[in-house]
Every structure is written in structure tokens, then in C-alpha cells.
Amino acid sequence: MLRQERERRSLPAPSLVVFCDLHISSKMQPAVESLLYQFGDDSADCNEKHQWRCSRLDCIRCYDLLRGYFWLGKARGSYITLDLNLQQKRCDRHTQIPFMCLSETGGIRQYICPLHKCEGHGDLVEGPDEPSTLTASLNETRTRKQIKQREELKIFTAFALSAGIGYSKVESGEEPYPDIRCIVNGGECWFELGEIVDEEFAERTSPNRRCFRGGFEFPLDTPLQRIIEKKCGKTYETNGGPIDLVLYYGKLPADTSAPGHIERYRTHLASLTAQGKFCRVWIFDSWNQKILWKTS
């Protein structure tokens, strides 16, 4: 029992409410980031990093016990930025961590120790500031289908720019049509998109999940094979127009062994055009905005 109590006292209080230190009327929301580590050519590890994020859409301020308050962008590949001039002191009741966080005590904003049952406290803060109208999540006002279509249009736009494809009148397609319809050189063209990503990684790191459930290992070579097999098994309506297949790296970057994986499945990729289903097949790295491979 004593050991369990000591462990609880080393963790944040269950009822802890954290406010942004730059927008003191805005509560911060618990968030989990994914940290990736590649081992060899065919596998990688995904580990979780817990923190709090400002609920304002126009703010990238975050907080955790080890670093205190810091900036971390929402874009892929973002890195942590600290400003020691804005940093609060650590709780003097503990040897190393934590940095104090801005919370609420008796209706007043005050810096407190975030650890369970610790009564350490710091400065009072005047305020609060003006409430933000930008606190609602964009995903709350869109259906999953709309979110998917928006992301597909974003990927297609970046792909077309990298591939040098001029187009007009782009729109999302509805099944049984491919994902994207547009006009190229005056004619109707279709593009089917497919993300190269491990299914377990996509499912366990989805923003719709409430719990990350700890680190895990996943393969890097099989996602390309699986998306090829998936697209081989689908049929499409195109009104007689041509259709290209764009396989892309989205949630995961193209790792250093991606060229080897592409070479390994070159025959499978070629079969997609040999069957007459697709006119061309492309592999697009959306992280670096680069075409990695295309059928000749």
C-alpha cells in the first residue's frame, strides 16, 4: 500500500486542470504524441508521449512535468521549442521534477505543483484574458467522410504539384468511383489514393482513440504489399475516363528503407497497370513532397 501511494504521488493528480500560460482562460487538453524509432530496414517502434495542449486552434502551447510550458507545432515532424524567460519554477518540494503548471484555486489562477496530493504553489496570475472563439475542434463539425475527403484533396493537391500535373475542377468521388475526379488537358481523369501505413499503427495512433495503450513495434515492409493487394481487389466506375493510382506516405514518413521496399514489390506494382485497371501507378512521399516512383 505504501509503495502504491508513493507511485501515485509521483504522478499528476487525477483531478488536475491545466490552463495555458499565454491564454489563461483556456484549459489545456490531455494529448498523446507518437514518437517513432526505426530499427533496421523492416521494423520500427512507436512510443507515446503524454502532455497537455492548449485548446485554442491558434495556439501550439503545450505543458508536461519535465519541460514545463513549451511550443510544439501540430504539423508532422514538429519539434519542441522552449523559452526560459517564460518558464516557471519547479516545485521546491521535489528534487528534480515537476515544473509548476497554471491551474485554478478558489476561482483564481495560480501556479501549483501538478503532482498528486502535493500542496506546493507559486505565483498568482491576474486575469483571465478574453475567451477565445477558436476552441472548438474542427473535427467536431465534420463527419468522418468529410474529414477523409478533405485529407484526400489535400494529398492530391500536393501530389499533382510534385508530379507536374495541371488540373482543374477537382472534386471528391463517391463509390464506386475513385477518390478524386478532375479535368486534365480538357478531359475527365480519375485518381485513386491509397495510404502506405501499417494498419495497427494507424488504428492505435488515431485521434479518435481515447487511449494509446503503450508502445508497440510494427513492420515497415508489409504496408506497401497490403495496399497493393487491396487496390488489386477493387473495381471502379470511371465513365470511360483514365484512372491513375497514387500510393502515398501520409501518417508515416517514407523511411530510409522505402526504396528497397519499392524494389521488392516492383513486380506487384507493375501488375496493377498490366491488368488494365490503372493507367499509371505513382508512389508519393507527402512529407518531403517528392515522387518516389512511377510506372514508366
Image (cartoon, rainbow, N blue to C red):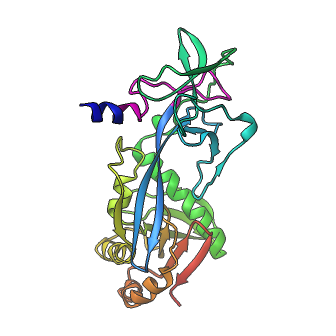
Residue 230 placement, left or right of 83: left
Q: Is residue 174 above or below residue 162?
A: above
Q: Residue at x 42, y 69 (%)?
A: 196
Q: Position of residue 159 (x, y in %)?
A: 59, 68
Image: 19 above or below 188: above
Extreme residue in the left direction: 1
Residue 166 in percent (x, y) is at 66, 70
Residue 66: in magenta span: no
Residue 273, visible in the rendered structure:
yes
Q: Depth check: give the residue in front, 154 or 84.
A: 84
Residue at position x 53%, y 83% in the image? 293
The quarter of the rendered structure image containing the N terminus is: top left
Point out residue 147 in the picture as x, y percentages from the top left corner: 47, 47
Total tally of numbered discs in the picture: 0
By secondary structure, the bulk of the magenta-drawn segment is best described as loop
**On screen, 101 above or below 143?**
above
Q: Quadrant of residue 89?
A: top right
Is 285 on the left-hand or right-hand side of 193? Answer: right
Instruction: Tell me, yes or no, if residue 166 can be seen here.
Output: no
**Segment colored magenta:** 8-28
Q: Residue at x 57, y 20 (%)?
A: 121
Q: Is residue 275 above or below residue 62?
A: below
